[in-house]
Structure formats: structure tokens, C-alpha cells
Image (cartoon, rainbow, N blue to C red):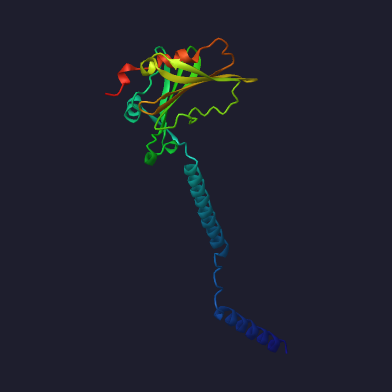
Amino acid sequence: MKKKIVALLGVFIIAASSISGCSSPEKPETPAAADTGEAKDESSAQETAGDNAEEEENSVGMANPWVDITEEEAKEIIPRLFQAPEGAEVRGWMKCESLGDAKKGISPLIQLSFNLDGMEYTARVQLGAAEDTDIAGNYVEWTAGPDDVTLANWGGGNMAGKVCRSISETGYVDQITWYDVEIGILYSLSVADKDLDGFDIQAVAEQMYSAENEPL
């Protein structure tokens, strides 16, 4: 009886082994997690690229309209151009195309920045601008002026100008504008400082005349 039981057990073990050996191999796991990670990385890269493109577009849209130019380039745009006063330290020449209008005969706005006697000046000029155009762009409330003046060096000593002064808690702002009726050129000169009491901005404007820049 025992021999029969043992024989039966042997047959059962062999059969079980045969079944196990013939079964189909397990399929390898699909790299679902890895694929998902790559997809996320690609999506993130696309979003980053999109963000960068948007930032670049915004940056271009907000680009500074002022560009650096040389004094010679300014002379090509403006006849009878002013010059920096003797002894001044020139900070730079610039132009703004967007503030001009070629169809109306209005040139780009030209700006000269310089330092004289420890004060920073901003001079601007535009060909074709109307006499009452605000090219200085100070946007302050004038405490005194505009007072009429006549510039001795400009226009053969007959060029009319206007002087204004603003006094506030932050200090002084002085401005002089003058207009060349012969050619149609508007000039402005501005300076800001803590105290300009007794200062004469017209005297600085007089020094900016250049006989060399007279048109032929």
C-alpha cells in the first residue's frame, strides 16, 4: 500500500514539473513609468520654451525707444545742432525715432546729456516740431515762468526763448526752450539740483551755440 502511495506521489510531482516548464514566460514589464516621466519632461520643456518666447516677446515689446548715436550722426539729422559747453563732460548722444514723424517732416528727437560744474544737464532738439511742443518732458509744475528771454548767440542775437523754474520738496528744476523760426527747430535744456538759487540756465544755453554747425 505504501509503495502505491509513493508511486502516485512521484507521478504527481513529475506532472507538476512538466506543467510548470511548458507555461508561457512572463511578459516583461512595460516602461510605463519611464515613458510618463519622459512625456512630463518633454511637456515641461515645451512649456518652458513657450514661457521664454513670451518673455522675449514682452521684452521686445518694451524695448527702450532711445538708441545711442554719435554727434556726427546727430548733425546729419539736425542742421544748426547745439554742442556741449566748453569744459562739459559729455555723457552721450541719443535719438528716439518713435517721437518723430517723417511724413509730417518731424525728425527723430535728439538728446545730449552732459555734466557741467557737478550738475547733470539734458538738452534736446527736434527739427520740424511746433514751437509749443513739449520736447523736454519734465512734467513738473512750474513755480516761476515761463519768462521771455532773448539768446544773444543764437539767430544773430534775436532768438527768442522761455525760461521756467520749478521748486518743490525734492529740489529745483530749471528749463529753457528756444525756437529757430528760420529753419523750424525746437531746442530745450533742463537741469535739476537741490538748490539753483541764483543760477542762470540761459548762460549755459548761450554756450551751446556752435558756428561750425551752421548750415551752408
The residue lying toward the viewer, choosing from 85 and 201, is 201
Q: Residue at the spot x=62%, y=20% of the render?
A: 170
The residue lying toward the viewer, choosing from 120 and 137, is 137
Coordinates of residue 144 in the picture (x, y in percent) = 59, 19
Q: Residue at the spot x=34%, y=23% of the render?
A: 80
Quadrant in the picture for residue 77: top left
Coordinates of residue 31 in the picture (x, y in percent) = 54, 64
The reply to whether residue 165 is in sight is no
* Residue 178 falls left or right of residue 211: right
Q: Residue furthest left?
A: 216
Q: Residue furthest top?
A: 198
* Residue 156 falls left or right of residue 37: left
Quadrant in the picture for residue 11: bottom right
Vertical comparison of 151 with 47: above or below = above
Q: Quadrant of the N terminus?
A: bottom right
Q: In which quarter of the image is the C terminus?
A: top left
The residue lying toward the viewer, choosing from 87 and 184, is 184
Q: Residue at the spot x=60%, y=82% of the render?
A: 14
The residue lying toward the viewer, choosing from 37 and 59, is 59
* Residue 91 falls left or right of residue 194: left
Q: Residue at the spot x=67%, y=87% of the render?
A: 8
Coordinates of residue 37 in the picture (x, y in percent) = 56, 58
Vertical comparison of 105 with 93: above or below = below
Coordinates of residue 158 in the picture (x, y in percent) = 40, 17
Vertical comparison of 203 with 66: above or below = above
